[in-house]
Image (tube, helix red, strand yellow):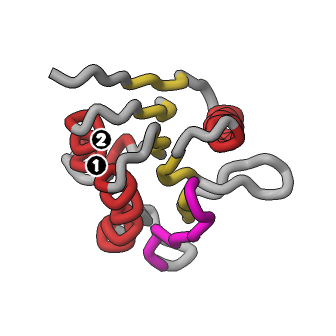
Amino acid sequence: MTDFAIAALVYDGEGDDAAAALWQAAHAAQAAGIRAAGLLNPLDAQGRHIKSQLVSVADGQSFEIFQQLGSGSQGCKLDGRLLAEAASVLRRAADEGADILFFNKFGHAEIENRGLNAEYLAAVSAGIPVLTAV
């Protein structure tokens, strides 16, 4: 059996500090020569994470993941099709043998068996350490 590790930063509030910490860890890993990959929310100029986007840790490719529902909408804006397109980055990184994967969490989507559950499982099954925030 392959050894693997899953680690998560536990946070309160909006998660801006956790998002920043994940980015810092990803950059530190890359600077140390570790093949870090994954998808994280980018940070704006004030250090707040941008929920409507994901960025590839490995190459900076950006993905919009929210559907345009209009200003009065109360529904979930996460677009499952757009998230699935972005998830291809995670699948490719796992296939190419990344040393560590950084994941954004989508609690409500994952509770409903959507989100990035399959990609988490693929990474763990491949023995790739995973770091996320919850």
Q: Position of residue 101 (x, y in %)?
A: 45, 42
- Residue 123's disc is 2
Q: Are marks 1 and 2 in contact (CB under 8 Å)?
A: yes
Please say whether residue 15 is visible from this viewpoint.
Answer: no
Q: Give the residue type that dot 1 points to.
A: Glu
For residue 60, which numbered disc appears in the image? none
Q: Residue 110: x and y, percent?
A: 28, 44
The structure residue drawn at horizontal position 42% and vertical position 46%, both measured from the top left corner, is 98
Q: Label 1: few (<14), some or many (≥20) within 10 Å?
A: some
Residue visible at 38% across and 72% down in the picture: 82
Question: Can see residue 7?
Answer: yes
Q: Which residues are magenta?
A: 57-68
Which x, y percent locates residue 56?
54, 60
- In the image, residue 18 sits, relative to residue 57, either above or below, namely above
Q: Which mark is residue 119?
A: 1
Q: Is residue 93 left or right of residue 64?
A: left
SS of the residue under disc 1: helix
Which residue is found at the position 62% from the left and 40% from the top?
33
Identify which residue, 101 or 14, lies in the foreground. Answer: 101
Q: Amino acid at mark 2?
A: Ala
Q: Position of residue 4 (x, y in %)?
A: 31, 24
Question: Is 63 part of what is drawn in magenta?
Answer: yes
